[in-house]
Amino acid sequence: MSEWFGSNLSSASAELLTQILDGDPVPTFVINADHVVVHWNRACEAIIGTPAAQVVGTRSQ
Amino acid sequence: MADLIVDGALENMVAEYYSGKYRRSALIAGAFEAEDYFPEFASGGRWLYFTAAPLRDAEGRVVGAIETLQDITERKRAENDLRDLKDQLEQRISERTLALSTANRSLNESITMLRETQAQLVAAEKLASLGGMVAGIAHEINTPIGVGVTASTTLANEIRHLRRMLESGTMKKSDLLGFLDHAEEASGILYSNLQRAAEQIRSFKQVTADQTSDALREINLRTYCDEILTSLKPQLKNTGIEVINQCSDILLQTYPGAIYQIISNLLMNSLTHAYPNGGPGKISLEAQAQGHQRLSLRFIDDGCGIDPAHLNRIFDPFFTTRRGQGGTGLGLNIVHNLVVKKLKGQIRADSTPGSGVCFTLSFPIILQE
């Protein structure tokens, strides 16, 4: 996630953010200013049926 | 929605279409929420509740957005079902209300019609009892008039006979004396019978006037009941039923027409129902003053009595056990109304099947206007 929001985010912080979002049972995704999906949590995968790997890095949310 | 937030478009859209589907979040500044239907979402259409909030950098620039989705299809469906149910219920209620008010209206019309019919039948009943009374009067007056006719015919014959003897010069003094005896006797018979007829006409005139007029008058209960019973004699003829007037001389100020109608209807009721095999029977009228204020009048027959199942319905209008056989079911209802409304009194019926009926009437001795 750090790569989308600047370099001031440590990889530990990025990992923590990912865990927080994935632990949220509400389907949640995050986009950046360029509309690129930077995060797609597990609940999103479950309800929409598309794995994060297919969405993250694209604009097809 | 996250896209719109990133573009900053949502601020303008919500400003322009505030009442549209996007709402500002009540909790998070800059966040929005919406509900919408997505026909091609996952497996079949779903209702989604989604929120989006901007992500900002240290300078406050929007660098992204976070969006959440929640499937609220079940809740929506339940809400719709509930709304449908409520609509159906309202529809049913309004239909039922309409049906009820229609039924109510037609019931009201029926009641109005029944009331009119009832009034007509009551009038007809009264007329019928007036007709019966006229027959009674005719019958009673016929007797003295008949005797008078016979006496006058006899007298005319005697006169013709005497004239013949006089003209042929064969008349003796004894013939003349005999004629005078006969003439005196005939004129006596004529006088007393005409007197009787006049007396009857006078009393019947009063009864009839009471029937047709509506005035308070003072009457002697005993003699008034006698007059009533005399006028009803034709109905009693050949029945083997005897009516005894045991009322004492009580002076009443009341509506005599009502008294007549009451006694006449009670009597006709007994004659119609109490003696299915005809007479013999005994009906009596008794009266007692209860203190100075009220009179208790009892009408008692010794007929077959009234079925206990019918006893509390006999005063209802149109209650009859003889529908289709000439019974209107109004006779005792008229009695009840007259006693209660006209005479300001009460009426009660007691009966033991097999041993007759007793109607007890209680009403003021002096009725005020």
Image: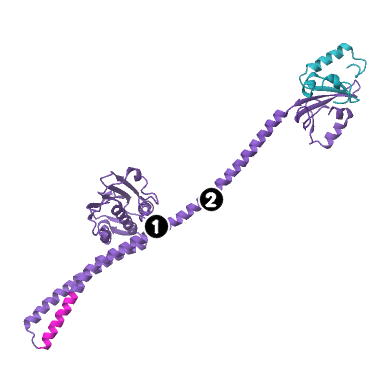
Chain colours: A cyan, B purple
Q: From the image, which quarter does the C terminus of chain B lie in?
A: bottom left
Residue B30: x %, y % from top left: 83, 27
Residue B304: x %, y % from top left: 27, 47
**Mark 2: which amino acid?**
Arg
- B76 part of magenta stretch: no
Residue underneath mark 2: B105
Return the residue nearer the eye: A20 or A54.
Answer: A54
Residue underneath mark 1: B122
Q: In this view, does B256 lie to the left or right of A44?
A: left
Q: Main secondary structure of the magenta part?
A: helix
Element marked by disc 2: helix
Residue B232: x %, y % from top left: 28, 60
Q: From the image, which quarter does the N terminus of chain B lie in?
A: top right
Point out the tag, 1 or 2, that comes first from the N-terminus. 2
Element marked by disc 1: helix
- Give the vertical position of B237 relative to A4 (above or below): below
Tell me if mark 1 has few (under 14), some (14-19) or many (20+) residues whose alpha carbon lies within 10 angstroms of its own.
some
Taking the spot 45% from the left edge, 54% from the top edge, the residue there is: B115
Give the residues in magenta. B151-168
Q: In this view, does B350 lie to the left or right of B6?
A: left
- Give the vertical position of B301 relative to A48 (above or below): below
Tell me if mark 2 has few (under 14), some (14-19) or many (20+) residues whose alpha carbon lies within 10 angstroms of its own.
few
**Residues under labels 1 and 2: Cα distance?**
25 Å
Label 2 resides on the chain identified as B
- B162 part of magenta stretch: yes
Taking the spot 29% from the left edge, 52% from the top edge, the residue there is: B270
Residue B87: x %, y % from top left: 65, 39
User: Do discs 1 and 2 share a chain?
Assistant: yes
Q: Is residue B76 left or right of residue B137?
A: right
Return the residue nearer the eye: B257 or B143.
Answer: B143
